[in-house]
Image (spheres, grey):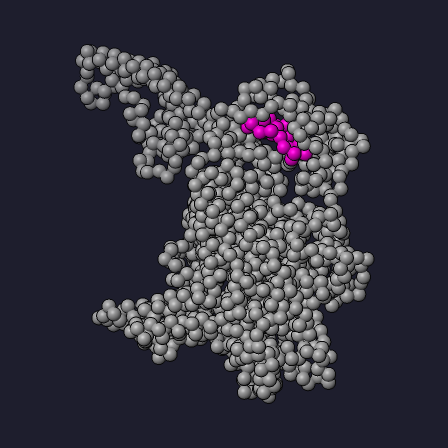
Amino acid sequence: MSALRWGRGAAGLGWALWPAGRSGVLAEEGALGSVWGCRGSSSASPCEQERRRDWGHAELLEVLEARVRQLQADRVSAVAVKRLDTTRLPEAGGAQLPRKAQTAAEGPGLELSGRWAQKLDKEKHVMQKRKQQLEAKLQQRAERRARKQQLRVEPQLQSGRLAARLQRREHRGPWEEQLAWLLQEAPRRLSLEGPASPADAAARARREGQQQRLLAFLECCVLAGQLPLAHHVLVTQHGRSRQRGALTLPMYNAVLLGWARQGSFKELVYVFFMLKDAGFAPDLLSYAAALQCMGRLDRNASAIQRCLKQMAHDGLQPQALFTSLSLCKEDQAALLRALRKAEPTFSAPQPPLPVSQLNSSPLLREIYNKDRPASYPRQHLPLKTLQGLFQQQLSVEMATTITVDSVEKAPSLTTEVLQARKTLQGLRAQWEAELCRALRETKASEAHAAREGRPTLFPYLCLLSEGEFAGLLLQTLQALPPQGESLLSLAQQLGLRIFNRHVVQRKRLTEEVRALERRYFKYLHLLASDTQVAVSRLPRQHWEALGAPEAPHEQPWPLPVVVQLGKQLAEVLVQTVRMPSHLAERQGSCKLIPVLYHVYSFRSFRQIGILKPHPAFMQLLATAAERTMTFEAAEVPMLCPPLPWTSPHSGAFLLSPTKLMRSMEGTVQHQRLLEGCPPAELHGALDALTQLGNCAWRVNGRVLDLVLTLFTDKGCPRLGVPAPPSEAPRPPADRLSADASPEQKAQLRRELAHCLKVAREMHSLRSDALYRLSLAQHLRHRVFWLPHNMDFRGRTYPCPPHFNHLGSDLARALLEFAEGRPLGPHGLDWLKIHLVNLTGLKKRDSLQARLAFAEEVMADVLDSADRPLTGRKWWMEADEPWQALACCMEIARAVRAPDPAAHISHFPVHQDGSCNGLQHYAALGRDSVGAASVNLVPSDLPQDVYSGVATQVEVFRRQDAEQGVRVAQVLEGFISRKVVKQTVMTVVYGVTRYGGRLQIEKRLRELSDFPQEFVWEASHYLVRQVFNSLQEMFSGTRAIQRWLAESARLIARTGSAVEWVTPLGIPIIQPYHHDSKVLISGGIQSLTFSNSGDASQKPNTLKQKNGFPPNFIHSLDSSHMMLTALHCYRKGLTFVSVHDCFWTHAADVAVMNQVCREQFVRLHSQPILHDLSRFLVERFCSGPRSKNVRVSRLLDVLLSVPKTGAFNLEQVKQSTYFFS
């Protein structure tokens, strides 16, 4: 019987086969039982099952060998025993066997033993062979596993010549000789290299995304101290023919620079071997790495000279190492040591002086004219105070977060509240420990994957400690709303916060913070009220004159990396954070349940993944009622004047990274345009943003107290104070009966959906107000600043999102200038006019009539100031009630002062443009009729373009009604300024007839006495008449709009996005492209997100066409605002803006109005449309593609610039109501 055939019973047979007394029987038996005894299914992998089976065979072989030895030793005795037993049988009472039977009993037994031994020998030979094969296989696997985990250093080269050079030890000289030979070797592209860039746009985008991720991984490895891992991944990718084609020169340079900083020359030469093997020629950064490595190692001069000689042969100059590369001071010092060793007289070139760079825009000539006197304003605080404020802001940014007390009504400290807080504290401590453990496991898993030669998240997880990651995750958990948050949005926020913390931490660990402090203290001498400087300059000019340029900025991570990192951390949070079930159910056990759930929901007809907190956890937070909130440092106003903007990536906050031009994450085209622009061309925008950020603010305490009174009670939605969740509508309490009709069920579902929608909206509004009011309370007795940046059109915005002057009426009323100025002889009049403007009651009256009206209602004004919540409440009827109330309080203080002209006022007075978009169109087309409609022409009374359009529409309606048009007859008496205002206002910004119809439909539905069955037909009719009226009144405007739209359409059809340069020199590109899909798979959900700003995709023709007219006008109104800001700053005024609404002190309104009009005239005196045509022709119609049919058509359109009218721009200077 073969051993393999009875192997299934080996678990029980093992005892019989082993000789008595043999050691280790139990262990071996157990092993046999595990292999042969059970027939059930196994969860082990096929590889593991095969390994166990082979080991079982080996163990069985040992059993069989022991049996063979037993049989050979007992062969003779066995026969004797049989004979003895046979002879004894009769004695036992049995019959005696015949002789033949005895012989038969002896003979076959001996033959059987011989055959048995032969089979066992054969089986032994087979099993020994299998055992040897198994051992060899296991050894190979162990070696492969060890090789995978071992970081590779020596590259695998494709070029036989380079590989032979690397491997031939007898011909290899010193590593310096190898480097010199490599630099002289001409680069060659190899035939087996990866494929060329795919023609398909989607494949090309994927390839570029992979390249960005790999480059970011290598750079992050270098920063995180994981340089050997970066080298290992680069070697692995280079050794794979399919991946090698995707490698780029910056990837090799990133690792080169890392080895150079460590002074590892051998590894550096290995990278040069790969660089040459890939067919790349070393660039300036490659040479810089080699030279600084030799400078750190103090290599001999001959090696350095050979390197410099090859540089010269490649057309590269040593001076460019210092002027063209952004290297830190240590790198530059090592470079200088190497160069001076080869050329002792070499000296590093000095950076060009900022004064030698001049802006070419004629509009800015006066700003940078040194011959004309300027009285730049200073801060109202002394030097010591500003230095102390700098230290406070530096502490906030180094901590990366700030904790603020909430203004929510504090609960009574009952036993329930105290117990909830204690429970939360214990859970958070437990969660932090669990998160740290889970993060260590995640990091180990990512490190293991990286050692296989592919980029992972491992280096990003090394940038911060586990404790910092855990704190960030718990902060994220605390801020989740009850309805949850999109996993994609949450992942992106987490990734960006990690990047910001990493940037701040890097600056903390270098000399950058101390250098910043020294430089900023010198800079404050320009701003402080009690210091003097030798030369009065703009803040940017003064900052640049104080020292060398800033250290190289940190490149942002690719958006897929940001999202993937955030997603990984969010998943760790979901899987780790748990709470006892008895918190959810009073009868529950001590079993742990998740705090976060991953669910799917529909948002705008799209299914998205949401992380939703457990209701029991939200109830625990509500019960604990902790009165603190945590904000990122960059989300809060600054406590000291911001850094002046000096480049596209340097300015605003002290340490927190801030973009000059805000854009969607992942969009790089704007940054590339800015970095490619000559620095001097951006000076106008940089200086305007710096001036806006230098305005000091303070909180209006009296208004804040009143708002908090309403907020902590039940809110007041009519005044813009959101109600608490307790005031949200409740769904019907009664349940439907079982026999309810489908209509009743549908009605209930609609009511539930409505209640849920309203509750979510109320929660969102309440949270927004809570953030704003809590920050206002936090900053109540402080001076603060709002750094600014701009969007891709040049429009400016404050960087802190929650508390600024761009918000609602309530947000604006909470702010006033920190520096006060005497009202002077006319300041009080401007306060009164401003108050009437805020009420919206006298829009078509003259300034004198508005002033007279203010005197008439002075009793109501004073009553509002003295008894805002208990008096006649006149201020509540205003269009902007909270700003009106603040103005009433300021007027009351002024009129009650002994000398109103000497009263120090901090109140900002606004001057608004009159339909500013149409003003720019009318000025571009020199349209006399349109100019008169939007107050470009002097008049005794303000012209109201909305009323004018309504009047013209009424004329058309009356004509149609007389001809029997039914809808025109129905609309009699319903056409008003309010019905057409929104459409007229937005048509200049590209609203379509469809969008205009929806706006008018909404207004008609608000009219209670209008027959609702005619709303749809009436809105169609009215939008057509509004567009016809605008065509009649603004013929020049419509012609320019059509020309811009058609130009953009044809540009997009040639495959390019529309670009232009503003009159102040800001380069602009429209970020409208077809979406590129990015997939991040794995985990609890695969994320797919679109990036419409990806410049590698084809432009979206419709969006490019519809977006160009309004975006171009926005770029003009931002240019006008920046010019006004710079000239007001030169005159010593405080100036801020909300797009086309300009703010200053009451005493300075007249000066600001004069500057505003002068700069509008100067702006539109330039040939703006012809300059635009010239730029577009040069950009899109020149070069080889000019013979293309589409390009020829585009050229014809671009050259047919709309003709202009005869309007005289100088009239604007005398127009009282241009801005009023």
User: Residue at 43% across / 21% down in the picture?
Assistant: 132
Quadrant location, the C terminus? bottom right
Say which residue appears at 55% left-offset and 30% top-offset: 235
Q: Is residue 705 magenta?
A: no
- Which residue is situated farthest in the front direction here? 1206
Q: Nearer the viewer, residue 1095 or 244?
A: 1095
| Magenta stretch, overall SS | helix
> Can the viewer see residue 129 in this picture?
yes
Q: Residue at x 56, y 41 (%)?
A: 216
In this picture, is 352 found above or below 259?
A: below
Q: Position of residue 52 (x, y in %)?
A: 39, 31
Q: Nearer the viewer, residue 174 or 924?
A: 924
For the point 18% across and 13% down, the residue is: 98
* Residue in the foreground of this view, choosing between 68 and 269: 269
Q: Determine whether, in the image, residue 115 is placed left or right of residue 282.
A: left
Considering only vertical position in the picture, is 65 above or below 235? above
Which residues, given as a range, are shown in magenta? 263-288
Query: Which one is in front, 1084 or 921?
Result: 921
